[in-house]
Image (cartoon, rainbow, N blue to C red):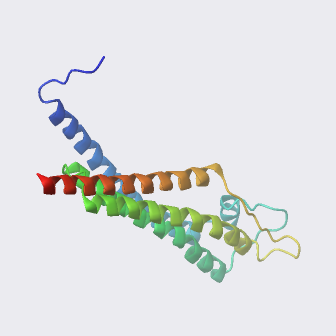
Amino acid sequence: MPLVPYAGQAEVELAKVARISTLLAWGCLAAALAVPVVVAATWVFADPNTLDLALRSAGQGPRGELAWWQRSAGLVLSLVPALLMARALLMAQGCFRRFARGVFFDHHNVAGLRGFAGHAFASTVATMVVTPLLGMLVTLGRPAGQMTLSVGIDSGQIFGLLVCGTVWVMAHVMARAIALADENAAFV
């Protein structure tokens, strides 16, 4: 049985969307700022064993201090996917801010959703490429035969790629809906 709308239901729903969108906008901003800072702090302050375990390249052999150039190279490599994800989150934040103001079907939202999907996709792919390089980097000081190369794709990365594809397609459908609405408005 269909729901019977009550007076003011649309306003209540819009207010709820505005509240949730505002929270999500602030969450995206906080995450966009925190991700690069946490990555940088990890490479600057973490001990080699922590980095080794974080990169899933724990093999046999001694683990000594990382050379300054290893930490620097690790920081630079790690910042690539982190900055791509930060950019994706900032683009999503812009969409949520517009949603909170009641702007839903807008070309800026389409561009923001596409930008989010593209940057998040690039960040996920960059992570898949950078992780093996980082594993090799942190094990460079080990004796011959104990360097580690770890290549893999986990379910989180696959899920991330699928979400990016889904958001990209939704943005395309949204762009088409806006074009149809503009076309219909021109005839009226």
Going by the picture, which residue comes out furthest to the bottom?
69
Horizontal placement of 94 versus 133: left or right?
left
Residue 33 visible in the snapshot: no
Residue 54 location, quadrant: bottom right
> What is the quadrant of the N terminus in the image?
top left
Q: Position of residue 146 (x, y in %)?
A: 85, 70
Above or below, 186 against 13 in this view is: below
- Residue drawn at x 41%, y 61% as measured from the top left: 116
Above or below, 107 against 12 in this view is: below
Residue 151 location, quadrant: bottom right
53 or 168, nearer to the observer: 168
- Residue drawn at x 40%, y 51% as measured from the top left: 170
Q: Position of residue 125 (x, y in %)?
A: 58, 65
145 or 91, nearer to the observer: 91
15 or 110, nearer to the observer: 110
Horizontal placement of 112 versus 128: left or right?
left
Above or below, 137 against 168 in this view is: below
